[in-house]
Image (cartoon, coloured by chain):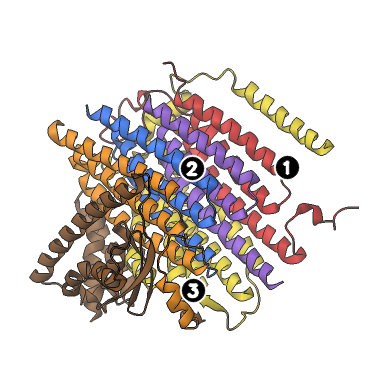
Chain colours: A red, B purple, C orange, D yellow, E blue, F brown
Amino acid sequence: MNLPGIEYLSLGLGIVLFLAGLWGIIHQKNIIKIIISFSVLDTSIHLILVSIGYMRNRTAPIIDSAVSKTDAASQVVDPLPQALVLTAIVIGVGITALMLTYALKLFNEKGTLEIDKFKSLKW
Amino acid sequence: MSYTFIVIIMGIIMLVMAFTAIYHKNLKVAVIASGIISLFASVIYIFLAAPDVAITEAAIGSALTVVIFFYVLNKIRLTDDTK
Amino acid sequence: MGYLGILGALITLTGALFILFAAVGLLRMPDIYNRIQAGTKATTLGSMLTLLGIGLIHPAWLLKIALLIIFVFVSNPVSSHVLGRAAHHIRVPLSSRTVKDQLAESESSSTNEQEVSE
Amino acid sequence: MIRNSFLVLITAGMAWILLDAVSGYQSREYLNDLSGYYATSGPEETGAANLVTAVVVTYRGLDTLGEVTILFLTATIIGFMLRTSKRREGSVRRATSEVLVTASNVLIPVIFLIGVYIFLNGHLTPGGGFQGGAVLASAMILWIMSQSGTKVSHSLLEITEAISGFGFVFLGLLGIILAGGFLDNTFLSLGTFGKLISAGAIPVIYSLIGLKVGAELSNIILVMNETQEAEQ
Amino acid sequence: MVEVILNIAMVIIGLSFLLVTVRFIIGETVVDRVVALDTLTVSTIGLIVMLAHFFGRVIYIDVSIVYGILSFIGVIIIAKYLEKSL
Amino acid sequence: MKIKGIIVVFFVLLAIWLILNGTADMPVVLIGAGLSLFLSLVLCSKCSVFNEIRISFRALVYTFMYLGVFISELVKSNFDVARRVLSPALPINPGIVKAETRLKSRMGRMILANSITLTPGTFTIDVIGDTFYIHCVHIEGDDTEKYAQSIVRKFEKYLEVLYG
């Protein structure tokens, strides 16, 4: 049986999740729902980036008894996307916390979470 | 072979959870569903040979985000009850 | 690897079967308390057996895996206890097959004994 | 109806762009030049066995500085926005289960230790400052959950955060003076490859980042917890 | 032999994931879904250690230690939220 | 005597640190000792949980006996619950029963509650005062009081020696 590799599967999965998150962001009207969709979208982008850095038959970029120090370049996967994603995840949780705080403030001001009810900027 | 099988299963579950997270009326369920998406994403990172990212996703993406979401939901509910 | 490896693999398979039983129990049980019973704890035993099997395959990893097993041993029952306590507090209904609920009886007889003010 | 079809159009356009971007994707066989450089000379230059750590702390250290700054700003803004007003008296809250209190007494030191292990071993095993900081923050959450009587002081967390943030920048500047550039870790001896005391300043830098991130995340949680008490 | 048995075990864990997901979807209350989350996390700990065997890297066990800690915290927070004492 | 608690925590943390690191080099041991001392002084100088442990030869023997009883009970009841789950008629008879415990120490009660919870078929729903409320999948016999006491007594006699 000829199955696609893991990296293609996770790449496709990342794209579908990205579209789902985008659809949630633009279609939903509850602010908390929008933030949840944002976190789904965030995860999908990380998935896409990491799967681009993957290479077949290679192992994690950590040198111990399983990977020799001298020919690490032919045994490990790309460390650069992983480092970028590491940064992105931490920033993602910061942004999510900040958005939730703003949502809380809005709720305390207006008493609702539906964005259609916020009319003070409409004219 | 079994790797592919389990990745496909986790992918299906993640898509179902994404649908739940976006469309479920109950916010608590939506938050838990997004937590499960992060959980399986971090298992997929292990398949993709990225244990660093897997730890970060499990610690920060899956647990802390859910905790902060629930704190905020609690706050919203508390104010709601008094009104 | 030898016999120890085969033994470890069989233990791992048993653990995986217990995880499957837990999932079946989670589906079939009639109310939430029985689901906690079937789900959480059979899974705990299942994953502990899985860990033990891998530890037997790789004896060098056994200490770290033992640490993980002890951690799961201490933390997991606490979380299911807290979950069950919360479920009973918010009055998630018990199934119709339940024969006795002495906690609800004693809660209704003593008026909110455990509510403390901060 | 018009709105929905417009949204479908946007999503379809995005899908087309993405599919176009990845349609010719082939799994790579070799590392590109930059990654190859990191993989071959990273262990020699930085002494870190974990290449991701070498990239995050040393080669891309400036990114990490920005990341830490963003997290600091987030924590500050959240504290500024949520730190409210008066505490309402006589709020009734259900007592924590006795089993949970005892278990958290047992588990909190262990979780703290695992957090410290994760960021102190960032150059040898997966993990590092951010993950270790998150684990420390989860120990703090457990503390807040179980010991509802005791108060955690904000000023202690803020002092920890300030000192470790200052130490991080100071080590970076020390790298400029004593070694090749900002956040260069080679001004301490590289030591034996693969041991705990090795890789120059990387364990020190990651410990500072871990303490800082842990303090910031705990502060966010603590502020959210206290606002609830205030407005219950 | 060992590899074959472990592959079968992995497929069984995958099937149990599917069953738990069915419970998540039909679950009547939120508590049911939290139990599903807990079950998934705990079985994932076993799965990760099996992956550590398949890839031959001891370092993956650290990941499952972090999993163990954080699933515990998450479930406790949700339970506290449900009983209105967060 | 808080000293005993601090010493116990110190050695437990040091052991965990060494297992995590996997080596016993000099710097690793030194850092671990310093860290464990700091954590045990800061976090356990106030809590009294660890003072209740009794350190003696008899306690050691009872620990192993307790572990044996617990593991055999665990395996036995796991198969029991698996049988109930897989049989088509679902032969369960659930209910919440209460049982008094004689244990006074918090550590002993936590381990008792955890043991009851980990044994499938029974789990501790609440602890109020000295009363354990236990949810059972299948209540055997007509005398619920006696059944509930038998669940608690199985583990209690060993834990009484260990923690009092």
Instruction: Check if mark 2 and mark 1 are on a common chain.
Output: no
Which disc, if any, is residue B25? none
Q: Please provide percent x and percent y for residue F97.
A: 35, 70
Q: Residue at 22% of width from left, 53% of height from top?
A: F76
Residue D207 against residue F157 in the figure, above or below:
above
**Chain under callout 1:** A
Question: Which chain hosts label 2?
Answer: E
Type of amino acid at the residue the image marks with label 3: Ser
Q: Secondary structure at mark 3?
A: loop
Foreground mark, 3 or 1, reads: 1
Q: Is residue F11 left or right of residue D129?
A: left
Circle 1 sits in a helix, a strand or a loop, which is it? Answer: helix
Front label number (2 vs 3): 2
- Residue A40 seen in the figure: yes
Q: Nearer the viewer, residue C74 or D179?
A: C74
Q: Could you say which is closer to the camera, residue D83 or residue E79?
A: E79
The spot of residue E45 in percent (x, y) is 36, 45
Based on the displayed image, in which of its 4 quarters is residue D102 positioned? bottom left
Pick the residue in front: C1 or B16.
B16
SS for dot 2: helix
* Residue D12 as seen in the image, left or right of residue F134: right
Mark 1 residue type: His
Quote the CA–CA distance across marks 2 and 3: 42 Å
The image shows a total of numbered marks equal to 3
Q: Amino acid at mark 2?
A: Thr
Instruction: Provide the chain ID for the residue under circle 3.
Output: D
Q: Residues within 10 Å of mark 2 (few under 14, many from 20)?
A: many
For disc 2, the marked residue is: E21
Q: Residues within 10 Å of mark 1 (few under 14, many from 20)?
A: some
Vertical placement of residue D163 versus D97, above or below: above
> Which numbered dot is residue A27?
1
